[in-house]
Image (cartoon, rainbow, N blue to C red):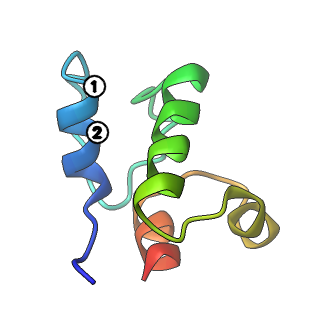
Amino acid sequence: MKKISIADIIKKKFPSVKTKITKESDLIEDNILDSLELMNLISYLEKVSRFKVKNYLKKNKKFVIKKMEKFLS
């Protein structure tokens, strides 16, 4: 399975995002995505991978790119 880059997905799906995105970025606290955009991203990840937001939130309280990508692996 190809490794998914959440930063690349954000750049493609949300071209209006101009904030610098790193592996340490918190999608909400760093104002990269608003809540609706985050839900769209999560929905997309659930469709293209085995990402399950309920399982993710059991272990993580924040949407940090590095943690999300690790969860996808």
Quarter assignment of residue 58: bottom right
Of the pair 38 and 19, the residue shown nearer to us: 38
Q: Amino acid at mark 2?
A: Ile
Q: Secondary structure at mark 1?
A: loop
Toward the top, the furthest residue is 16
Mark drawn on residue 52: none
Residue 51 picture location, percent across and down: 55, 65
> Which residue is drawn at the image coordinates 41% and 69% (left, top)?
69
Q: Position of residue 40 (x, y in %)?
A: 50, 32
Question: In the displayed structure, does residue 44 sit left or right of residue 42?
Answer: left
Between 4 and 21, the one lying in front of the other is 4
Q: In which image quadrant can residue 23 be found? A: bottom left
- Kindly identify which residue carries mark 2: 10
Q: Amino acid at mark 1?
A: Phe
In x, y percent, where is residue 34? Answer: 52, 21
Residue 62 vertical placement versus 49 (above, below)? above
Which residue bears the numbered disc 1?
A: 14
How many labels were placed on the picture?
2
Quadrant where the image shows the N terminus: bottom left
Q: Position of residue 61 (x, y in %)?
A: 73, 57
Label 2 crowd bin: few (<14), some (14–19), many (20+), radius 10 Å:
some
Q: CA distance from mark 1 to mark 2?
A: 5 Å
